Image (tube, rainbow, N blue to C red):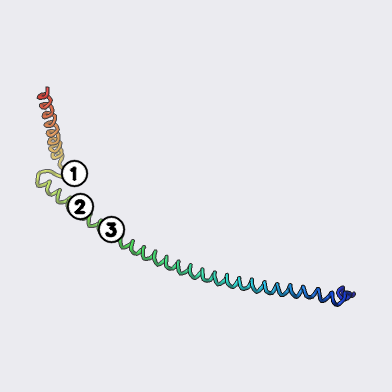
Amino acid sequence: MENPDSSLPLSIKKENVTPITSKIAELNESRSELLGRVQSLKQDLQSWRSKLDTQVKVYRDELSELKKTLNVEVDQLRAEFQDLRTTLQQQQEDVTASLRNLGLQDASDVKHAPSQETKIEKIVKEEQVVVPEEDNSSKVAET
């Protein structure tokens, strides 16, 4: 079989070769541009990753510091609450001792001495009785 291009005149063959050569040159140029853009994008991506890694490290360090600070503050609060608890217990003991000195007992001692509870109730009832009598006398004076 004979090549189809061989039957064409030489001038037609040259015309066909010229557009192909220019197309190849265009494609090579386009390929070079695309490769350059891909390289540029790769560099941008590496730069972005590096910046992101740096930022993540900074945030982790900050979080670590905040966690340490928070733990220190929590420990301080625990110590303060323990001090408050101790102070309140001491004050409660002081009040209990004062009540004992006055002849009264706190609620935990009342369980063992029901007569004290009765004394306290009598005092409270007497105070309630006194108040209405005063109110009645003032009402009588008004009328």
Residue at the disc numbered 1: 107
Question: Is residue 17 toward the left or the right of residue 34 in the image?
Answer: right
**Disc 1 crowd, CA 10 A, few/some/many (<14, 14-19, 20+):** few
Q: Looking at the image, is mark 2 or mark 1 earlier in the sequence?
A: 2
Compared to residue 138, the image places residue 64 above or below, namely below
Residue at the disc numbered 3: 77
Mark carried by residue 133: none
Relative image position of residue 101 (x, y in whole percent) = 9, 47
Residue in the foreground of this view, choosing between 44 and 9: 9
**Disc 3 crowd, CA 10 A, few/some/many (<14, 14-19, 20+):** few
Q: Can you tell which of label 2 and label 3 is closer to the viewer? A: 3
Relative image position of residue 3 (x, y in whole percent) = 87, 75
Callouts 2 and 3 close, C-beta under 8 Å: no
Question: Is residue 50 toward the left or the right of residue 108 in the image?
Answer: right
Determine the secondary structure under disc 3. Answer: helix
Compared to residue 95, the image places residue 57 above or below, namely below
- The quarter of the picture where the N terminus appears is bottom right
Residue at the disc numbered 2: 88
Callouts 2 and 1 close, C-beta under 8 Å: no
Give the residue displayed 38% in from the left and 65% down from the top.
Answer: 64
* Amino acid beneath label 1: Ala
Give the residue displayed 20% in from the left and 52% down from the top.
Answer: 88
Q: Can you tell which of label 2 and label 1 is closer to the viewer? A: 2
- State the separation of the CA atoms marked 2 and 3: 16 Å
Q: Looking at the image, is mark 1 or mark 3 earlier in the sequence?
A: 3
